[in-house]
Image (cartoon, helix red, strand yellow):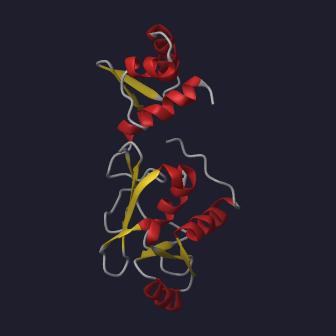
Amino acid sequence: MNRKEEILKLLEEGYRTAKELARHFNVSLMTIYRDLKELEEEGLIVRRHGNVELKRDQEVKEDSCAVCGKEVDLRLAFIYVLKGGRKIYTCCAHCGLLLAGSIGRERIEIAMTRDFITSNPINALDSYYVVGGSASPCCLPPAVAFGDKETAGKFAKGFGGRVADFEKAVAEMEKLMKGGKKMDVKL
């Protein structure tokens, strides 16, 4: 990984100033400023008042999906909190599962969604999903989250689709959308 890629990773983890970055890499401020200038010209970061931020941090808001751009309805939303505190919102389980494959499980601190039937908050990583089927609350192909396997099974019996845990649902959604290839989503 080159230094500019590593800078982007460090910004995601919470580094905010050129001085912190220079210290981390044990290089001069001028060296870091050159890297930051290039990253800014590439549209990947924004520098303001001595701070450095990933450009995406400013663009992605709670009210728009990080994958498809739709308005986020909190009854269906996925919320990821990455290590370092950054939050990423998606509009539904379909987009949440797709994004998980791009983020990588090791970078996810917390993943939250709501049970489709009860609307209670649930840990998305420990939930069950009905992938496919005829019920499509948001994006297609549909994916619907449930807090327990039994309820997911009953839903699948009535509306079709396959019941899967988080890992299998991520793999299934990737397969359905990209023939098994991971999406290239810039974080």
Residue at the spot x=49%, y=31% of the render?
Answer: 8
| Residue 117: percent from left, percent from top | 35, 81
**Relative to residue 119, is residue 102 drawn left or right?**
right
Residue at the spot x=53%, y=24% of the render?
Answer: 42
Q: Quadrant of residue 177?
A: bottom right
**Relative to residue 68, is residue 123 drawn left or right?**
left
Q: Nearer the viewer, residue 22 or 150?
A: 22
Residue 101, compared with residue 140, is above or below; it is above
How many marks are shown on the rendered structure?
0
Outermost residue toward the right in this view: 179
**Relative to residue 116, is residue 156 drawn left or right?**
right
Residue at the spot x=31%, y=63% of the render?
Answer: 74
| Residue 162: percent from left, percent from top | 58, 81
| Residue 173: percent from left, percent from top | 59, 66
Q: Nearer the viewer, residue 39 or 6?
A: 6
| Residue 31: percent from left, percent from top | 51, 11
Residue 128, compared with residue 4, is above or below; it is below
Residue 38, compared with residue 147, is above or below; it is above
Quadrant placement of the N terminus: top right
**Relative to residue 157, is residue 172 drawn left or right?**
right
